[in-house]
Amino acid sequence: MSGNTDVTRELRRKVRLGFGENRRASMQRRLCGAVVVALLAETLMARTVAAQCEAVYVNPVDGANLELELDAQGHGAPFTFEWIDSGCRETNRVTLFKDEFPILFSVCSAPIPVSGGPALVTWDLGFNPHPTPEAYCWRVTDAPDNACFTVTTVGGPTPTPTPNPEPGGFPPLFPPTPREATDTRYVVTSGPGINTACHYNTDGPIDIQIPIDRYVGPVDSFGTLQDVGLLVGNGILSPDIELTIEAWDVDTGGGNSSVAPEINKVTFNGVPAANATGAGASTLNGSNGTWSETKFKIPIGVARFRERGTNGQPPPDNPLQTNLLRIEVDTGNSFKMWCTSIAAVTLSFKAMSPVILVHGNGSEPAFWTRQGFEAGLEDLGVALDNTVELPEASISTNSLALAFMLEDRAREFGVDHLHLVAHSKGGLDSRDFLAMYSGAFDFEVVSLVTLSTPHRGSGLADFAVSYQRFGAVTGATSEAMMLATFASLVGSSALSVTEGRRDLTVGEVGRFNERNISKLPTDTIIQVIGADSNTDDDPLGQLSFSGDNLNAFLLESPGLQVYFVLRGPPGIENMFSILYRFLLNRRVSVAIDRTLSQPAEFVPTTTSNEGGGPNDVMVTIFSAEGPPNSGFELQPNYLGGDGRNHADIGDGRVASDAAAPRDVFRLLIETDTRNGGLK
């Protein structure tokens, strides 16, 4: 130990000159001849200080051993060197003091026998003390009054005084404009944890709550998606969420041999967030005195979503279904050093927009259920609504009612984008909504898919309106009488003329197109599909009850069910074959004089706007495809062996069929990728 005489002399001088106040404070704390040990970090070498029962300062660095040299100066009685430890409830204890407060310590001492000469005893400190000035209170019992002590630390890294923390306070205003929130992008720019003063590790973690106020699919009580594998597998939902954090003054390049760089660990609902930039897993990136953006990828299954709202109300606010972003600041240092502040947090993901089903004239929402279309989409995980119910009214009446229904549905789902799938006249009602009201609401329609919608009117509607208005057909043939029978069976009343039926006639739809097409929003994609019910391509247009699935019609008309009971399959086949040939071979117009009370005459003609051709026994493909230059996207029609009639055009295989050339589900995915939540 003699090699350290110069160091000892210098340390004694510093004890006398520089630590007078510290010595007086520590002397007040020690018990019975206590010796206080605290930080002096000027040298890499081991250091020794001998003093006659006075304060001695030494640094207990990481991994160091503590050597105590004792000289009883001729006294042979053993005595005890004790650490006052709050973890040991007996006599031999060690207390570590910092800023006047005792800190728990866990090593107990033992008696040290000394018999008339120097003795050297070494303890392993057994802990990694904080590299800041600490004061240790040592107590000696049963020691002679003139005992001398030498305290030395050996080994361990060079102690470094704790640097001052970087300045705190409020950062400058976040310069970029936060990205706009949508139904697939959720932005938090206010609330707890946002725009605070610079946050140190001594302030605890930064906790930011991020609600995703949207229904994507069924969730449990904690907002976890129950069918996440189904949704991701079918392309309805992205596999990951992108988390973007705008943070101030992240000193990832700071630090030195004794100060770690700024490490801010990020977790999302308790799961470490993977840094998408590859600059370090689960930590923020940045530099001193600047705003920095860090992106993370989080599995979509970790996120928490909301349940669907009801009665036109948004998804209910549920704290258990709110996402928690936690940022643990400066985890590499156990002392106050680096700080940061968060200006904005953004969650982004991709999700297909919900689908709203719109039934046809005189029908109901249950049409989609009976025919299997609803289940065809739901089985894939599509978020849809089948509650829109419209009266047998005019296009303009229904479009206004539809506007408010769609507003409610968008609010319930928590979205600003929707898809519409419409059958028959529901397509015309939907088109009128798009032209007249879509710009007045806070949601947009990504696409409208129409199934057998008479975009050019229906000659059969002309005949039905003519028959039901005047109650008879003059010059009637057997064909005309069969048409009249069908008109009475499918109508709500044999002698009533509803506005819904009238708006399906060739003339009314023609006038509708003149005022509608030019007003349709250009960002809504309209896709049209027609069908041919002659599945076996019979050259005479003779349909069969089983082969052409005419029983699908029976589900939609109580009148036809009665007719079937009375006439059996041959009667149904005969009726629908007449309907099919009527629309196949002729272009029709019906003389309707609404000022006369006498019956109009049914007059076949070739001058009508409604073209003949393959049809689903109510609407021709010619009409389902819409007028030229309409901007509608024509999709493969259901023809031949895969043909459909006006009822089963709404079946489950039309909704989703991987073997089909084009099912509705694939249309929805495609248009959503172009213009919706999957974009």
Image (tube, rainbow, N blue to C red):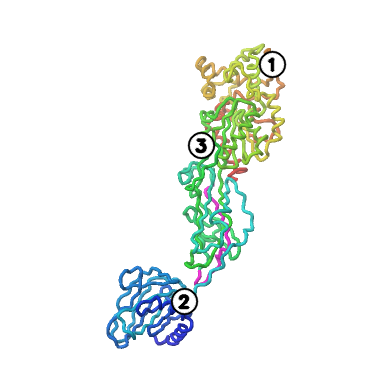
Q: Earlier in the sequence, mark 3 or mark 1?
A: 3
- Say which residue label 3 marks: 378
Above or below: residue 221 compared with residue 663: below
Residue 424 picture location, percent across and down: 60, 28
Q: State the separation of the CA atoms marked 3 and 2.
A: 67 Å
Residue 242 picture location, percent across and down: 55, 52
- Say which residue label 2 marks: 158
Above or below: residue 391 compared with residue 233: above
Instruction: Using the rendered image of the protein, determine whether residue 60 is visible from the camera's viewpoint.
Output: yes
Q: Which residue is drawn at 58% across and 18% down?
A: 493
What residue type is disc 2 on? Thr
**36 drawn magenta:** no
Q: Earlier in the sequence, mark 2 or mark 1?
A: 2
Q: Which of marks 3 and 1 is in front?
A: 3
Above or below: residue 618 compared with residue 270: above
Number of numbered tags placed on the structure image: 3
Q: What element carries label 1?
A: strand
Q: What element carries label 3?
A: helix
What residue type is disc 1 on? Val
**In-front residue for pair 30/353:** 30
Q: State the separation of the CA atoms marked 2 and 1.
A: 108 Å
Q: Quadrant where the N terminus lies?
A: bottom left
In the picture, the disc for residue 603 is 1
Q: In this view, does 260 lie to the left or right of 71?
A: right
What residue type is disc 3 on? Glu
Tell me the magenta residue range. 238-259
Callout 2–callout 1 Cβ contact below 8 Å:
no
Farthest-out residue, left: 77
